[in-house]
Amino acid sequence: MGCFSFYPGKNLGAYGEAGAVVSQSEEYIEHIQRLKNHGQSQQYHHDEVGFNMRMEGIQAAILSCKLKYIAEWTKRRQAIAEEYFKDIKNSKVKMLVWFIGGIL
């Protein structure tokens, strides 16, 4: 199972609240489908306490358009991060280090 946040400040962000859950397990997907629809397996039949969590179509459309540029934006963000790592020499500043494809 994987969970993705499309919060506006993220690299691939919507213009409002949005997210996704993915899984190869039909059982998990069915459970998530119930949870996002007030816990209902069918109309007016609540198997469990759920929520109202459906991403708006406009958010999906925005994400679909932005997805075309994600590789380019990610490369740019990585280049900016490299500059920070290279140019900040202050011993009082601790930089968070992560490994991106062998770059850092």
Image (cartoon, rainbow, N blue to C red):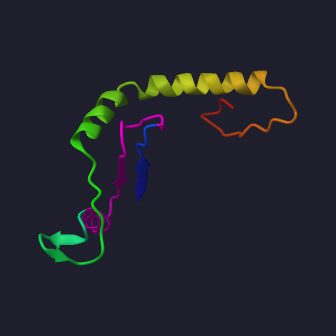
Quadrant location, the C terminus? top right
Does residue 86 lie above or below 51 as drawn? above
In-image side of 55 versus 1 (left or right): left
* Quarter occupied by residue 59: top left
- Whether residue 81 is in magenta: the answer is no
**Image location of residue 89, percent across then percent down:** 84, 26
Q: Quadrant of residue 43?
A: bottom left
Q: Residue furthest left?
A: 43
Which residue is drawn at the image coordinates 65% and 33% (left, top)?
A: 102
11 or 53: which is nearer to us?
53
Q: Is residue 21 above or below residue 80?
A: below
Residue sitting at x 42%, y 35%: 12
Residue 24 located left or right of residue 8: left
Q: Is residue 46 above or below residue 18?
A: below
Q: Which residues are magenta?
A: 9-36
Q: Residue at x 51, y 28 (%)?
A: 74
Q: Nearer the viewer, residue 23 or 43?
A: 43
- Looking at the image, the residue that sits furthest to the right is 91
**Residue 23 magenta-highlighted:** yes
The location of residue 92, given as percent across then percent down, is: 86, 36
